[in-house]
């Protein structure tokens, strides 16, 4: 890992006041990320999960059970109450409840609440973290392959956010525990985290201004003839909603990726090229989608790559190598570099490429 500091004047007019632009939709890197939407929600108190006995009143007459319960138990969402009914955790006058049942207004209801996995999503956990830089304002993390950045469906624990809250408890007072951008689970490399709200505000604005430098190394199938620039809007895939795609939809957002050839090689007798990619924007899966769209998918990419060649490498061969930004306090330009992890280094060696 390399770190350098260069004299630089801070971006003019950067206001340290807390702005509305801390909302996730204002930052490229949180675009279309349902799992990163909003601030961490407080955990539901353990006492809320003890059995509850309720007696409906006249105001519940003619209401469906789930609606009547939502009025009596506002601390729980209607969807959660419906789930408990479906799971047999609610009885009406001693019998299993039906959500669409119409109430008379004098029933005895017993609810046995069941915690959801998401109730524990924002708890501190001892997740191993490699810190390459730390000061009073910033933390720079070398994210390993396999680490999810933020809790979401299927990954409610063991995330970077959980690890940050364990190591730096005060981050519970900073939106998203200071996270301002993300890397996919199977992408390795550098991420910056803000330790204060003031620093987070500044970093968010730098991302909006496209002044944060982020360079990636990507090993792709094929050999581009020259260096290039891809400007193609990205939006949700029209049929597969878990994927992104180059799109002409009015909902698609501007995305720009620059790529430069570093070296060429071969894997299993097929040509591959190591590219250095620089982001102007930070859309979801941007580099993976852009490179696949011009016919050079990333080696190992199970979502956007060559499916018949997935066995060559167990993940996308993509690494966030370099990070550049203006320090939010002292105003110097700072940068960090991180070498590729061992698995990708071995893949490049197999291809006859020296990174």
Image (cartoon, rainbow, N blue to C red):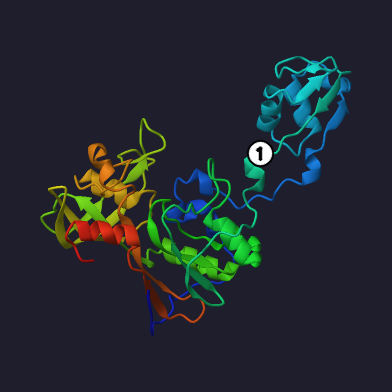
Query: Which residue is denoted by mark 1 in the rendering?
Result: 116
Quarter of the image for residue 265 reads bottom left
**Side of 47 where 29 appears, left or right:** left
> x and y percent of residue 71 in the render?
78, 31
> x and y percent of residue 11 in the render?
43, 75
Instruction: Say few, some or many: other residues with alpha carbon within 10 Å of mark 1 (under 14 / 14 to 19 / 20 or more).
Output: few
**Side of 217 where 208 appears, left or right:** right
Q: Residue at x 51, y 64 (%)?
A: 129
Quadrant where the N terminus is found in the figure: bottom left
- Of all residues, the one furthest to the left in this rendering is 225
**Side of 240 where 203 appears, left or right:** right
- Of all residues, the one furthest to the bottom in this rendering is 7
In this rendering, the answer to whether 80 lies above or below 267 is above
Q: Residue at x 77, y 24 (%)?
A: 90
> x and y percent of residue 297 in the render?
24, 46
Quarter of the image for residue 303 reads top left
In this view of the protein, which residue sits in the foreground, 322 or 18? 322
In this view of the protein, which residue sits in the foreground, 322 or 22? 322
Q: Residue at x 39, y 49 (%)?
A: 284
In this rendering, the answer to whether 8 lies above or below 336 is below
Label 1 residue SS = loop
């Amino acid at each position: 890992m390399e770190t350098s500091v260069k004299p630089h004047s801070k971006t003019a007019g950067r206001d340290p006041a807390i702005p509305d632009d801390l909302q996730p939709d204002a930052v490229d890197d949180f675009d279309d990320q349902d799992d990163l939407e909003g601030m961490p929600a407080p955990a539901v108190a353990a006492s809320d999960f003890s059995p509850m006995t309720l007696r409906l009143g006249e105001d519940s007459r003619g209401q469906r059970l789930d609606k009547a319960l939502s009025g009596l138990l506002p601390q729980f969402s209607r969807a959660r109450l419906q789930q408990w009914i479906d799971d047999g955790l609610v009885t009406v006058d001693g019998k299993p409840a039906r959500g669409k049942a119409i109430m008379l207004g004098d029933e005895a209801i017993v609810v046995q609440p069941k915690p959801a996995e998401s109730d524990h999503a924002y708890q501190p956990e001892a997740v191993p973290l490699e810190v390459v830089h730390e000061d009073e304002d910033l933390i720079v993390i070398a994210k390993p392959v396999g680490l999810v950045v933020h809790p979401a469906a299927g990954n409610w624990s063991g995330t970077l956010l959980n690890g940050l809250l364990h190591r730096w408890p005060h981050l519970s007072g900073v939106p998203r525990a200071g996270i301002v951008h993300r890397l996919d689970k199977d992408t390795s490399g550098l991420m910056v985290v803000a330790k204060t709200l003031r620093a987070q505000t500044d970093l968010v604005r730098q991302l909006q201004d496209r002044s944060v430098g982020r360079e990636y190394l990507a090993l792709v199938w094929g050999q581009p003839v020259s260096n290039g620039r891809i400007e193609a809007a990205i939006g949700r895939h029209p049929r597969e909603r878990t994927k992104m795609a180059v799109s002409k939809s009015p909902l698609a957002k501007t995305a720009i990726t620059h790529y430069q050839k570093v070296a060429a090689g071969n894997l299993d007798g097929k040509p591959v090229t190591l590219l250095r990619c620089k982001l102007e924007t930070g859309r979801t899966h941007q580099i993976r989608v852009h490179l696949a769209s011009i016919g050079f998918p990333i080696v190992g990419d199970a979502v956007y790559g060559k499916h018949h060649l997935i066995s060559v490498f167990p993940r996308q061969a993509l690494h966030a190598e370099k990070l550049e930004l203006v320090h939010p306090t002292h105003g110097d330009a700072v940068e960090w570099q991180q070498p590729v992890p061992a698995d990708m280094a071995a893949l490049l060696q197999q291809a006859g490429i020296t990174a």
